[in-house]
């Protein structure tokens, strides 16, 4: 009898991978209210989407130009909507309530473990970026109470002021392609934009708490639309403001005189407000990271909330790893290149497409399969070129001419 109960505990733990509340917590949570609202769910999913990736998007405009860059942001949002729709439909078709569950239905325990590894790599990569940005703000003394939207509002206001003052040059609308290396460099923006839309590991948790789960597809569309607008505006105004001087982390541009009144006060407001935003989003990404690490390395253990020593050990280890990596990785662009070209693209596009092609519940349409093949081909080919381009850049940078 005791063995049976223990097995049920293990299965319950596996089914709850990537769901933010354990069963007992969910029951207590639901007893206090009737479920999440539509607007609340849009806000929660948007918070998952908008993270540190927004800081690297203006630099993608420097590579692609405004026209191609904005088109890429919109195109990636459309693909993200399709991949999330696959996860939702195939989860319902197979009776799963998590990303891990639908992967387990399609590919068994190895599919679930692959997902856990991808979440591990992706979330550590993103959290490393958060630590790099927060560390760069350690000398800021101003106070701020706003979140990421303050960055957009202030950047837009400064840009508009300088536009009317005539101190901003006309930006490039298309990429500057001069040789084959500049062509390869265009692909390096793909991992960055891919990472900007990764929220798939939190979709099911938000759906499970939604008052009317049938609204989830509308929640996803609304969130992606809202975030796309924020991304486009941030990329546009950030690139207009700094032009070809835009750094890989545009927040680093806000440390000098911007050529407007109260320049340094505005710099502090932008940097501190965004640091506050990152600190609030940090736990949202850290939770699924912790749950998946626990499921990956302790698959047969009791639920994490019942063993405080394991809980403390995993928390300490993950924070230590993130902190160490943040001190050795030179820039957020490098972090995005690694995690975006591997784990993020797998989480966002390759694995959902593979689920549709496997079609365990037998509900895939011809359109699903065609778009899934296209998505896998596009993801693998573009990110392979991005990795190749990054590798060439590293070798060229490290090669020293012999005299």
Image: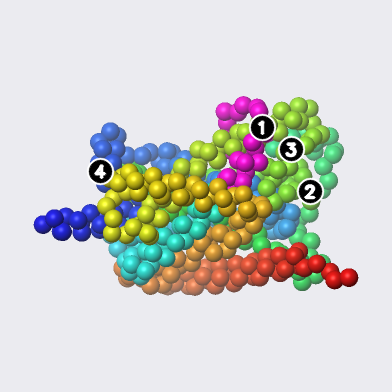
**Label 1 vs 2, first from the N-terminus:** 1
Nearest-to-viewer mark from 1 and 3: 1
Which corner quadrant holds the C terminus? bottom right
Range of the magenta residues?
129-154
Q: Secondary structure at mark 4?
A: helix
The residue under label 4 is 24
Instruction: Please tell me which residue lies in front, 163 or 338.
Output: 338
- 225 sits to left or right of 161: left
Residue under numbered circle 3: 255
Give neighbour class at mark 1: few <14, some 14-19, many 20+ (Cα, 10 Å): few
Point out the residue furthest to the left here: 1
Mark closest to the chain's N terminus, 2 or 3: 2
Q: Earlier in the sequence, mark 3 or mark 4?
A: 4
Q: Is residue 232 visible?
A: no
Q: CA distance from mark 4 to mark 2?
A: 52 Å
Circle nearer the N terminus (4, 1): 4
Q: Which residue is mark 1?
A: 140
| Gap between marks 3 and 4 measured at Cα | 48 Å
């Amino acid at each position: 009898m005791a063995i049976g109960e223990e097995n049920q505990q293990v299965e319950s733990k596996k089914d709850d991978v990537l769901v933010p509340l354990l069963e007992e917590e969910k029951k207590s949570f639901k007893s206090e209210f009737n479920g999440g609202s539509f607007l609340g769910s849009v806000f929660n999913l948007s918070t998952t989407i908008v993270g540190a990736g927004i800081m690297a998007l203006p630099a993608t405009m420097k590579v692609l130009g405004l026209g191609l860059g904005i088109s890429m942001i919109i195109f990636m949002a459309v693909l993200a909507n399709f991949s999330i729709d696959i996860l939702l439909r195939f989860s319902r078709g197979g009776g799963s309530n998590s990303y891990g569950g639908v992967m387990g239905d399609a590919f068994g325990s190895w599919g679930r473990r692959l997902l856990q590894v991808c979440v591990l790599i992706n979330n550590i990569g993103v959290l490393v970026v958060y630590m790099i940005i927060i560390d760069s703000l350690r000398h800021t003394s101003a106070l701020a109470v706003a979140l990421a939207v303050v960055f957009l509002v202030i950047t837009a206001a400064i840009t508009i002021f300088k536009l009317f003052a005539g101190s901003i040059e006309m930006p490039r609308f298309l990429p500057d392609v001069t040789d084959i290396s500049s062509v390869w460099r265009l692909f390096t923006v793909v991992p960055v934009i891919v990472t900007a839309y990764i929220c798939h590991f939190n979709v099911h948790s938000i759906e499970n708490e939604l008052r009317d789960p049938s609204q989830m597809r509308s929640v996803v569309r609304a969130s992606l639309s809202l975030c796309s607008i924020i991304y486009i505006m941030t990329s546009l105004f950030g690139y207009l403001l700094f032009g070809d001087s835009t750094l890989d982390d545009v927040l680093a541009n806000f440390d000098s005189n911007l050529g407007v009144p109260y320049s340094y006060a505005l710099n502090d407001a932008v940097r501190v407000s965004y640091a506050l935003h990152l600190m609030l989003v940090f736990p949202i990404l850290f939770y699924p990271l912790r749950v998946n690490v626990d499921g990956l390395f302790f698959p047969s253990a009791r639920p994490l909330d019942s063993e405080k020593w394991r809980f403390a050990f995993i928390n300490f280890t993950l924070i230590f790893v993130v902190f160490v990596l943040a001190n050795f990785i030179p820039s957020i662009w490098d972090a995005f290149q690694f995690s975006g070209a591997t784990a993020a693209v797998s989480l966002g596009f390759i694995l959902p497409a593979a689920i549709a092609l496997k079609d365990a519940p037998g509900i895939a349409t011809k359109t699903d399969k065609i778009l899934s093949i296209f998505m896998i081909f596009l993801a693998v080919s573009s990110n392979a070129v991005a990795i190749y381009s990054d590798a060439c850049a590293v070798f060229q940078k490290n090669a020293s001419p012999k005299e």
